[in-house]
């Protein structure tokens, strides 16, 4: 386990470890689609940062609780990861107990071994003082009063929060209010970008229109975090809430202005 706060060089260390292991174990004629080091992270943004894959994509982990791999899929992954010597998981604080067990189970199946994680070496990177798992239980025990008192001694209170700071809120409602206030404080014209929705298939136009009308009134929590209207101003910061292209770093959580 390698733990450190943001900016301490964890991603750089991951790169150095990967290159070292490649020099040690990779054969000159090795198939490039069969990696020596498997790099993963729980989110698209974190995976893009280390030039890896999300846990779901890399291991074929489905979104439903009862999803499982077919025999042919296990064989496919077994071939793909035949040369893997080490598994690196970044942002480990966001990996919950259920997801962690799925990683363990899938690697066991791929390697045909009952050893933990299929007998592979596992390196965890992250900071447990940062974000916890989403809709999952932590992989460590509950914090005690003694732990709380120790954490209080490490607190640093800023008298003034920088304008460029990223703010975290408890609910989407609070986020929307904060974003509205921030947008209103920026001078300049407001431009609205309307989403273009379409319905494929051979259904009558009237039926398609009913579907489109219903979609326009849906909350973004039911549309995969895709807004029907985005309000834009020059100089404002915007964050992607959907993975578009991991290779180009257009991932959920990427920020630009």
Image (cartoon, rainbow, N blue to C red):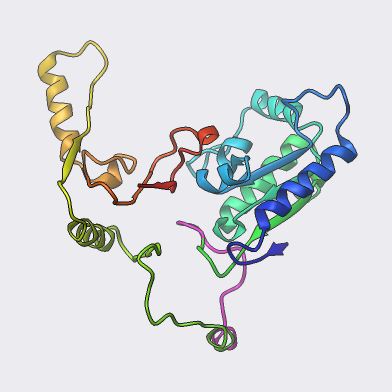
In the foreground, 248 or 78: 248
Q: In the image, residue 71 lies at what x, y percent?
A: 67, 26
Who is closer to the viewer here, 158 or 246?
Answer: 158
Main SS category, magenta section: loop
Residue 60 vertical placement versus 210 (above, below) = below
Q: Is residue 128 shown left or right of residue 201? A: right
Magenta range is 133-148
Asked whether 255 or 82 is in front, the reply is 255
Question: Which residue sits at x=80%, y=46%?
Answer: 120
Which of the 4 quarters of the picture holds residue 29?
top right
Q: Decide: is 73 above or below 101.
A: above
Q: Quadrant of residue 123?
A: bottom right
Q: Position of residue 34 (x, y in %)?
A: 75, 28
Whether the magenta-drawn stretch holds residue 135 is answered as yes
* Relative image position of residue 3 (x, y in whole percent): 67, 65
Task: Pick the quarter of the image with the N terminus.
Answer: bottom right
Question: Residue at 13% across / 31% down in the picture?
Answer: 213
């Amino acid at each position: 386990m390698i733990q450190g706060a943001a900016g301490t060089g964890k991603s750089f260390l991951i790169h150095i470890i990967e290159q070292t292991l490649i020099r040690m174990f990779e054969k000159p004629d090795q198939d490039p689609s069969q990696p020596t080091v498997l790099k993963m992270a729980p989110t698209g943004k974190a995976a893009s940062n280390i030039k890896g894959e999300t846990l779901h994509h890399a291991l074929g982990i489905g979104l439903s609780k009862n999803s499982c791999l077919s025999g042919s899929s296990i064989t496919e992954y077994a071939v793909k990861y035949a040369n893997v010597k080490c598994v690196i998981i970044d942002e480990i604080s966001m990996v919950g107990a259920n997801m962690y067990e799925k990683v363990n189970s899938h690697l066991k199946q791929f390697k045909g071994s009952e050893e933990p994680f299929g007998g592979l070496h596992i390196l965890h990177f992250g900071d447990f003082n940062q974000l916890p798992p989403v809709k999952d239980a932590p992989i460590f025990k509950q914090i005690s009063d003694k732990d709380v008192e120790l954490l209080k001694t490490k607190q640093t209170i800023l008298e003034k929060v920088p304008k460029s700071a990223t703010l975290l809120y408890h609910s989407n409602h609070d986020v929307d209010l904060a974003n509205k206030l921030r947008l209103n404080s920026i001078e300049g014209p407001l431009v609205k970008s309307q989403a273009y929705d379409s319905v494929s298939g051979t259904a009558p136009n009237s039926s398609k229109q009913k579907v489109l009308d219903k979609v326009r009134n849906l909350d973004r929590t039911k549309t995969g975090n895709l807004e029907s209207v985005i309000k834009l101003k020059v100089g404002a910061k915007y964050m992607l809430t959907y993975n578009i292209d991991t290779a180009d770093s257009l991932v959920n959580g990427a920020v630009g202005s």
